[in-house]
Amino acid sequence: MSESQNRSEKATPRRLRQARRKGQVARSRELVSAGLMLLGSLCLNAWAGTFGNFFIAQMRSQFTIDAAAARTPGVMVSRFGDALLDMLGLLIPPLGLLAIAVAFLGILPGGAVLVWDNLLPKGSRLNPLTGLGRVFSVRSWVEAGKALLKVLLVGSVLWIVLHQNSATLVGMSRASFPVAMHRGLQILAEAWLFMAILLGLIAVIDVPFQQWQLLKGLRMSKQDIKEERQSVEGRPEVKMRIRRMQVALSRSQLKRRLPKADVVLVNPTHYSVALRYDPKKAKAPYVVAKGIDEMALRIRELAAEMDKPVLALPELARAVYYSTRVDQEIPSSLYNAVAQVLSHVMQLKAYRDGRGKQPRPLANLPVPVQLLKERGKS
């Protein structure tokens, strides 16, 4: 089975982005040709009378000279140069419109892409074997078929337009030059308009075909997708090793931070938050460690080993977890609840030291509802 037959999967977004960076995007020459023909037809209709009058005016002003001037060296060259500059001034607006149309229509199907590498000379482009392979490719046959179809359509349109305007063309020989030129340009504009319509019909088929052909060429095999996933996400064994290193690092940080904690609030299973109150360091209690799931369990285990008080206050634990980062003070809306917790911890410590009565268990303390949700989520 060939490599192309193995490519049964659609291209992934990553492969499409890579192809785009290399300049592989859908392009349609037929769309550009149709747009140029249409705009050219409109320009000819708009400037037809102007061209005729301009040509006559130039002939009269630049090439009507007296005998003395005709004998002066360089006069004819100067007059011709002036006429050429005037002609360029007349042609710049329509030519500018055509240039803008080429740029816009050229990037319309696939968007604007600039790849500097494609501007550099490459030896592979001069390889005759590579070129021979392109000649006999399916794409080349399709392009050849489209070219033949365009030749037939253009020839047919020209024949029809000339046949319909044959009487007008014969009568133009008796008309003045501006009138004849004006009418001739109108006939040419009519031919271009019909050709634009026909090329537009071809472009309607060609644009989705070019997109389909591009996506077909970028299709991937299951092995390609697997290798891409591994390159993006990493191999499973590497990911596991990184995960173990992260867990080990987190545990070492917890062992360094938890001794500073005054109390640990738990959910009791999913959230754990370690708090400390040090008036010399901060104006309010702050978080020294926090975690969810596996990390929360590790915090509870270490807190038990270090004989730190662990209180099951689900709502307060979640509120502190979502509202406060590590080494950050708790928000003022939690001052009252956390103050009750710290007071309870002091009473509990006094009881353990034999200096007071056993405090009553803390009920679930009220906290603002908006702090019970992760920031950015409703």
Image: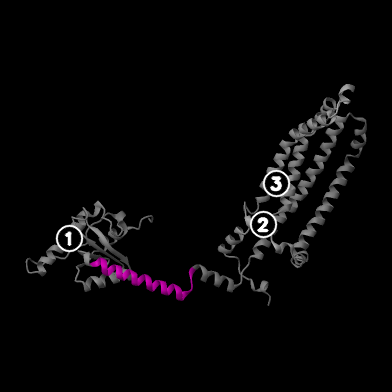
- Please provide the residue range marked out in magenta: 233-258
Q: Residues within 10 Å of mark 2 (few under 14, many from 20)?
A: few
Residue 245 magenta: yes
Q: Would residue 304 appear left or right of 142 to someone viewing this image?
A: left
- Which residue corresponds to the image point at 74% horizontal and 48% vertical from the top-left? 34
Q: Residues within 10 Å of mark 3 (few under 14, many from 20)?
A: some
Which residue is identified by label 3? Answer: 102
> Please, what is the three-letter code of the amino acid marked with disc 1?
Leu
Q: Residues within 10 Å of mark 1 (few under 14, many from 20)?
A: some
The reply to whether residue 66 is visible in this rendering is no
> Please, what is the three-letter code of the amino acid marked with disc 2?
Leu
Mark nearer the N terminus (1 vs 2): 2
> Please, what is the three-letter code of the amino acid marked with disc 3?
Val
Quick one: SS at disc 2?
Answer: loop
Distance between the alpha carbons at the discs numbered 1 and 3: 74 Å
Evaluate if marks 1 and 2 touch, with contact meaning CB atoms under 8 Å apart.
no
Which residue is identified by label 1? Answer: 342
Q: Nearer the viewer, residue 146 or 202?
A: 146
> Which percent across, then down, holds residue 266?
26, 66
Asked if 177 appears above or below 11 in the picture, the reply is: above
Distance between the alpha carbons at the discs numbered 3 and 2: 22 Å
Mark nearer the N terminus (1 vs 3): 3
